Amino acid sequence: MNPLTKNTIMILAAWSGPVFVLTYLIFWIGLGHNLPPPNFMAMTGAELVNEYYGKYTADIKLGMTVTTFVGLLYLLWSACLASIMAEKSGPTLFSNLELAGGLLTGWLLAFCPAIWLSCAVFVNVVDPDIILMVHGFTWFMFDMTYMITGVQLLGIGLWTVFHKEQSFFPAWAGWSALAVGVIFLPLTLIPYVTSGPFTVAGIWNFYIVFGTWGFMFFSVYSYYLLKELNRQRRELIGATHRTSHTEQYQRT
């Protein structure tokens, strides 16, 4: 493949990450009425239906329909990250961990909204307690399988810290990614609490977990990934121009 074409594809894949975050904020957080999500551990099935699915049915349907598609954009972003890791040091355990974790995270980001969509579609068909059970099961799967994303953070974090010869991700970004993985740990408490910071809608398990993932990991790596790819693009364009000028000079 032409190097410039490859670089263009990589840049598009890198931008799929920010597009994913923006659309997820609009459709999962906004239209999905997940700021914060309902604290289902403290609700009955009837309360969940009356205060959430029954009240916002149309919004939730649209929001979850879109997020079942855009969630998988995270897979493209993760694959781009793994690709640039492999370009520098070849395929390693770390790049494989990053790719596998990103792939499964992307699947969760699309699959779980499909189940919440089902709850909204069938809210007036099945028993409210079934809606509660399915809704809760989906949140357990969405949040408590955090080790999937933790594997991605471990892979990229350790690669960044130990591969000192690479210059596009600073060492502090690797430590930041590893710290985010540790911050995820209290998500394990969700089934056991009905109030406080460790509920699904709590200060820690919602705002801090998602906020640190966004600002301490995703934003940092997106910035440096795009910075490196654009640097490579400038070099490729410069090399192309120099080659073109050399060929013209030789013909004259």
Image (tube, grey):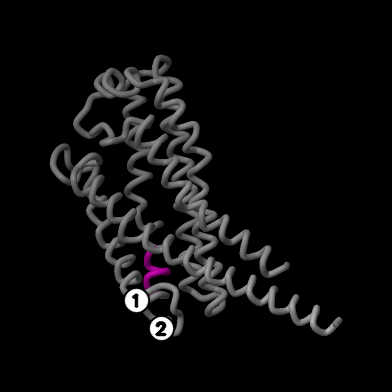
- Residue visible at 48% across and 42% down in the picture: 110
Residue shown at 47% from the left, 34% from the top: 114
Q: Nearer the viewer, residue 197 or 176?
A: 176
Q: In this picture, is 213 found above or below 64?
A: below
Magenta stretch, main secondary structure, is helix
Q: Which residue matches tag 1?
A: 171
Residue 233: percent from left, percent from top: 59, 68
> On the picture, is 142 further left or further right than 206?
right
Above-or-below relation of 206 to 46: below
User: Residue 235 at what x, y percent from top left?
Assistant: 59, 74
Residue 62's mark? Answer: none
Q: Which residue is mark 2?
A: 164
Counting residues from the N terminus, which is met first, the one under dot 1 or under dot 2? 2
Magenta span of residues? 153-158
Q: Amino acid at mark 1?
A: Ala
Q: Are marks 1 and 2 in contact (CB under 8 Å)?
A: yes
Image quarter of residue 234: bottom right
